[in-house]
Amino acid sequence: MSTPLVTPGPRATLERLQVDGVLLLMNALWGVTFVMVKDALGHGDPFSFLGLRFCIGALTLSALARRKMLERATLLRGGALGVLLFLCFAMQTLGLVSTTPSRSAFITGTYVVLVPVLGWAFFRRMSSASSWAGVAIATAGLYTLTGANLREGLSLGDVLTLGSAAAYAFHILFTERIAAKTDVVSLVAVQLWVVALLSVLCLPFAGARVHWTPSFVGAALFCGVAASALALTLQVWAQARTTAVRVALFCCTEPVFAALTSVGVGHERLGPREWVGGGLIVLGVLVAEVSGVLWARFFPGRASAPTGG
């Protein structure tokens, strides 16, 4: 028997808005760091920067988590998520050696499609029609915003970048399943230690190169505290209260914040392509967020409504 939709009450609406605000703040923090990281990598190699960045974030959260992060369940769950997070960063970095930044940005963003696909394949979690519509629009926006040209076929760098997107998609999916079962700060602290350790272990193979300039140290401090410790804590907090698909959709706003930041500091100007791409990404999020609520309000008795995912 079909169950009619119920319009969310004030408390549910307020919590939804809180989660939306947290997800936007998380992606704003990540978006701001693009310019910082680009400048910092002119003074050091990627794995030295990652090791320092995540070590700073891990130390910050460890001071808050203390003994809770040493619980067996937290170590196992955080360790697994940390490996996925490291694979995401490492494969994206290695992929940039033999692909273009625009292709890398778009292929990385395909996790927004991989999350619902892998969620169905591995967990039989079917996303709603409104979520799929939002995913399609946001993906078109990513393609437009990045200006990626995929007509040349896939290079090794593209394949590595696609692996990075898959790793992040699994990271989002598994975070959804365990976020409510583990202390948030402790779970993130363990992840950051794993990424920092694995980054340091890569240095003998990648070659360490660091010039301790104020911009390099400042970027590592900001990325470690704000973009790693705080942003990942916000992600886990939000995923205890919403779905993986919704998180992936909001993550599409990261390049929008990155572009706006780049314009704000005078690094580049946005043309029609960037504005259209960014607008489509925002529209995709709005379609997924609002369509289910509007359907429930205007057609409360129809069970086939495209409820939000």
Image (cartoon, helix red, strand yellow):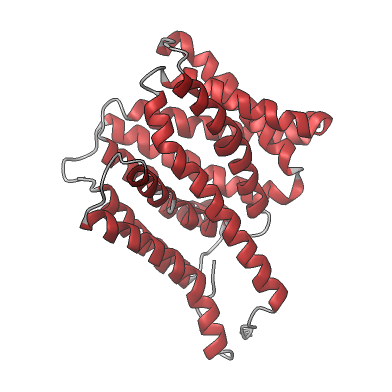
Does residue 72 appear to the left or right of 176 in the view shown? Answer: right
* Residue that extends furthest to the left in the rendered view of this protein: 152
Q: Position of residue 219 (x, y in %)?
A: 49, 28
| Residue depicted at 43% across the width and 54% down the height | 253
| Residue depicted at 30% across the width and 31% down the height | 157
Total numbered circles: 0
Residue 238 appears in the figure: yes
Camera-side residue of 257 and 150: 257
Q: Quadrant of the N terminus?
A: bottom right
Q: Position of residue 265 (x, y in %)?
A: 36, 41
| Residue depicted at 61% across the width and 66% down the height | 17
| Residue depicted at 34% across the width and 29% down the height | 95
Residue 303 appears in the figure: no
Vertical position of residue 73 compared to residue 218: above or below: below
Rendered image quadrant of residue 207: top left
Camera-side residue of 208 and 303: 208
Q: Quadrant of the C terminus?
A: bottom right
Q: Position of residue 203 (x, y in %)?
A: 47, 12
Q: Position of residue 221 (x, y in %)?
A: 56, 27
Camera-side residue of 239 and 118: 239
Does residue 198 appear to the left or right of 36 in the view shown? Answer: right
Does residue 41 appear to the left or right of 15 in the view shown? Answer: left
